[in-house]
Image (spheres, grey):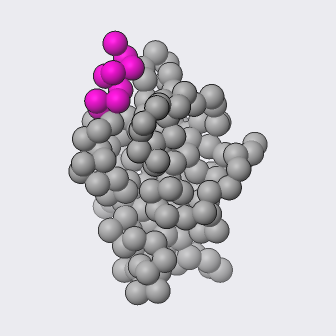
């Protein structure tokens, strides 16, 4: 994925349009704003960390830097399926901390007019923790759950990630 300039981000917002990376986890389609995505990589060998929380899949070496990889299915309380050729790691930066999220597949990048985004209905909020959601995007024949990646992990969970990275960068 290419880096987006601040001007491009401002332009996207002023156009009233979101540019989203669409991915699948469990049986649901999710979208995250492309400006939150550093890159998308194929599943790679992940080094497990003994006694780490169950949502931490492990660590990877990403161009010389250690990055923590999170299993998004576990965080969101959804069923995990076995990894296959479609499994991807979405690398994001949350408050200057690089974190990878394992997802079942990444399907597309699309533009969604802001007018097609609504608050998550109660039924959706019951299925997926509504704290994670920015809203629901209405596409022609499907709904897209829009995630706020900065809220997927709690502050306490996020605080553990730099410590894990430091321990393994040394």
Above or below, 111 relative to 126: above
Q: Nearer the viewer, residue 158 or 38?
A: 158
Q: Name which residue lies at 64% across and 36% down.
A: 43
**Given the current orientation, which residue lies at the most extreme right position?**
85
Q: On the rendered structure, is 150 left or right of 47?
A: left
State whether residue 72 appears in this view. yes
Q: On the rendered structure, is 26 left or right of 36?
A: right
What is the quadrant of residue 7 in the picture?
top left
In the rendering, at what x and y percent does residue 80 appear? 62, 57
Q: Name which residue lies at 50% across and 24% down.
A: 62
Q: How many marks?
A: 0
Q: Name which residue lies at 41% across and 44% down.
A: 53
Above or below, 158 relative to 136: above
Above or below, 106 relative to 137: above
What is the quadrant of residue 114 in the picture?
bottom left
What is the quadrant of residue 28 in the picture?
bottom right
Q: Nearer the viewer, residue 90 or 7?
A: 90
Q: Is residue 50 magenta?
A: no
State whether residue 19 appears in this view. no
In the rendering, at what x and y percent does residue 27 appear? 64, 68
**Given the current orientation, which residue lies at the most extreme top position?**
170
Classify the position of the C terminus by image quarter: top left
Q: Nearer the viewer, residue 128 or 117?
A: 128
Q: Nearer the viewer, residue 45 or 33?
A: 45
Main SS, magenta region, reads: helix
**Given the current orientation, which residue lies at the most extreme front position?**
51
Magenta span of residues: 162-170
Q: Name which residue lies at 45% across and 42% down.
A: 56
Q: Is residue 167 magenta?
A: yes
**Given the current orientation, which residue lies at the most extreme bottom position?**
122
In the rendering, at what x and y percent does residue 149 appear? 38, 54
In the rendering, at what x and y percent does residue 157 appear? 30, 47
């Amino acid at each position: 994925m290419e880096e987006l300039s601040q001007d491009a981000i401002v332009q996207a917002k002023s156009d009233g349009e979101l540019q989203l990376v669409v991915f699948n986890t469990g049986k649901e389609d999710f979208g995250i704003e492309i400006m939150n995505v550093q890159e998308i990589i194929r599943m790679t060998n992940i080094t497990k960390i003994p006694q780490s929380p169950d949502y931490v899949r492990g660590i990877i070496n990403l161009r010389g830097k250690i990055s923590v990889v999170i299993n998004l299915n576990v965080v969101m309380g959804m069923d995990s399926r076995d990894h296959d050729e479609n499994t991807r790691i979405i690398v994001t930066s949350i408050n200057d901390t690089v974190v990878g999220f394992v997802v079942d597949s990444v399907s597309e990048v699309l533009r969604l007019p802001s007018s097609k985004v609504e608050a998550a209905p109660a039924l959706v909020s019951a299925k997926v923790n509504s704290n994670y959601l920015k809203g629901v995007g209405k596409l022609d024949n499907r709904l897209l759950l829009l995630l706020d990646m900065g809220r997927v992990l709690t502050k306490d969970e996020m605080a553990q990630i730099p410590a894990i990275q430091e321990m393994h960068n040394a």
